[in-house]
Amino acid sequence: MLIAQAVNPTLAVLGQIAAIIICIYIVIFAVIALVFNIVLAFGLAWVGEKAALLTTLRSTIDSVNKTTEAAIQGRPVSVNENSLVSTIAQGPARIYALDKGVDRGARRVVGTLIEFSARTAQIQGIIKALVEPQG
């Protein structure tokens, strides 16, 4: 048995409009979520590439540090080292050698000044002993 229900035509039209608006919101939300996921995927891929680059760069920096330490200690740089690494390592080694030279020069100058001051005091003492009357 069929039950006949009275349907208000205005209410039916408003229900269909509400259903269309809800469907449009769902499509917009799905598109925004899809774009967000695509942007995140590309961003994480980019970060992964940069992390791999940093890992490669870290091994190069470690090699530069070891080569620099060897150059400062006076050990020769090995032939199989990267030319960039050996060039970079020569800078601190040259600065270290220059610093050693400056230290040696400063010690020599200080030693000479001390010697000059001591000789001057010695000469003054001798002159005072010769010139002043004995009493």
Image: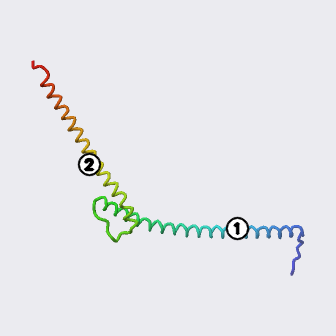
Horizontally, residue 32 falls left or right of residue 108, namely: right
Q: For the residues carrying marks 1 and 2, which lies nearer the camera in this image?
A: 2
- Say which element carries label 1: helix
Image x and y of residue 104, in percent: 26, 48
* Measured Cα–Cα span from mark 1 to mark 2: 75 Å
Q: Residue at x 14, y 21 (%)?
A: 132
Give the class, few, some or many, for how many residues have Cα within 10 Å of label 2's Cα (few <14, many ≥20): few
- Say which element carries label 2: helix
Q: Residue at x 90, y 72 (%)?
A: 6
Identify residue type, mark 2.
Arg
Q: How is the image coloured?
A: rainbow
Quadrant location, the C terminus: top left
**Disc assigned to residue 10:** none
Q: How many marks?
A: 2
Identify residue type, mark 1.
Phe
Give residue 93's quadrant in the image: bottom left
Q: If you read the primary sequence from the N terminus, does the residue marked by circle 1 or circle 2 appear first?
A: 1
Horizontally, residue 37 falls left or right of residue 105, namely: right
Furthest residue in direction top, as rendered: 135
Q: Residue at x 34, y 61 (%)?
A: 68
Image x and y of residue 14, in percent: 85, 67
The reply to whether callout 1 and callout 2 are in contact (CB within 8 Å) is no
Horizontally, residue 3 falls left or right of residue 117, namely: right
The residue that mark 1 highlights is 29
Quadrant location, the N terminus: bottom right
Give residue 91's quadrant in the image: bottom left
Give the class, few, some or many, for how many residues have Cα within 10 Å of label 1's Cα (few <14, many ≥20): few
Q: Residue at x 90, y 70 (%)?
A: 9
**Disc assigned to residue 104:** 2
Is 91 in front, or is 123? Answer: 123
Is 25 in front, or is 76? Answer: 76
